Image: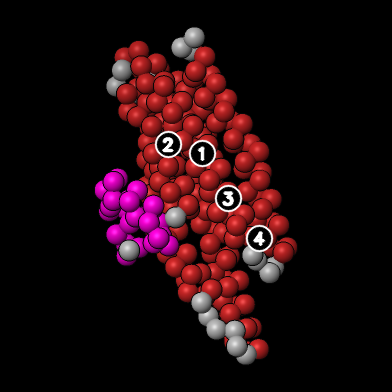
Amino acid sequence: MGVSRITALSCSDFVEVLASKEPVPGGGGASALVGAIGMALGNMTASLTVGKEKYADVEDEVVALKRKADALQDRLIKLVARDAEVFAPLVRAYRLPTDTEARRRHKAEIMEACLRRCCAVPLEIMKCCCEAIDLCERFSAIGAAIAISDVGCGATCLRAALEAASLNVFINTASMADRTQAETTNAQANQMLKTHVARANAIFGDVASRFK
C-alpha cells in the first residue's frame, strides 16, 4: 500500500486494508481519521449555525471557530498519511541484522530515531484532538440546537481518537532506550488524557442530558 494513496481510499477500501496484514494504515492512522471525523461532526454544527438569524449574535465567533475546525480537519487527515510514513522505516529497522557489534549499534541508533518519529505523530494527533474537543465544547454552548447531537457525537469520536492515539505513543516509548525522553513523552500524553477525556465526557453528558 503506497502511503500517498491511503487518504484517497474509499471508506470500504480503507477498512479492508486496515483489517489486512498490511503494516499501514494502523492504529495511529485510524486514530487520526476518527479524530478528523469527530472534528467534522462538530464543524457540521458550525455550518448549520452560520447564517441563521436566531444565532446572529454569535455568528462572528462561530465563523472564526469554524476556520480553526477546518484547519484541524485538514491536519488530522494529513496525519493519517504521516503516521504511515514514519512507521514504514521502523518496520525496516526491526529487520536490520545484528550479527556483529557494529551492526547491533547501527540498528539501535536507527531504531531509536524511528521510535522518536513514531511517538511524535500520535502525540501530534492527540494535540489536534484536544484542540478539537475544545472547539466542540464551545459549539455545544452556542451552536444550533438542531445539530447539538452532532457535537456530542463529535466529542465522543474525538475522545476515542485521543485515547487510541495515546496507545500508539505508549507502545513506542516502551521500546525507547532514552528513558528520560520516553518518560517526558509519556507525561505529555498522560496530561492530555487527564484533561481532555474528562472534557469530552462532559460534552457528551451535557448533550445527552438535553434529550431527557
Q: Earlier in the sequence, mark 3 or mark 2?
A: 2
Magenta-drawn segment? 2-25
The residue type indicated by label 3 comes to Leu
For marks 1 and 3, the one nearer the N-term is: 1
Counting from the top left corner in percent of width and height, residue 88 is at 44, 68
Residue at which label 2 appears:
38
Disc 4 to disc 1, C-alpha distance:
21 Å
- In this figure, which residue is indicated by the disc labeled 3? 167
Q: Is residue 173 above or below residue 73?
A: below
Q: Which residue is mark 1?
A: 160
Q: CA distance from mark 4 to mark 3?
A: 11 Å
Residue 38 vertical placement versus 121 (above, below): above
Q: Residues within 10 Å of mark 2 (few under 14, many from 20)?
A: many
Instruction: Name the element at disc 2.
Output: helix
Relative to residue 152, is residue 99 depicted above or below? below
Residue 161 picture location, percent across and down: 49, 42
The kind of secondary structure element at disc 4 is loop
Magenta-span inclusion, residue 19:
yes
Image quadrant where residue 73 sits: top left
The answer to whether the residue labelled 4 contacts the one labelled 1, judged by CB atoms less than 8 Å apart, is: no
- Cα gap from disc 1 to disc 2, whole angstroms: 9 Å
Location of the N terminus (image quadrant): bottom left
Q: Secondary structure at mark 3?
A: helix
- Badge 4 is on which residue? 174
| Mark toward the start of the polypeptide (2 vs 4) | 2
Is residue 3 at least partly visible in the picture? Answer: yes
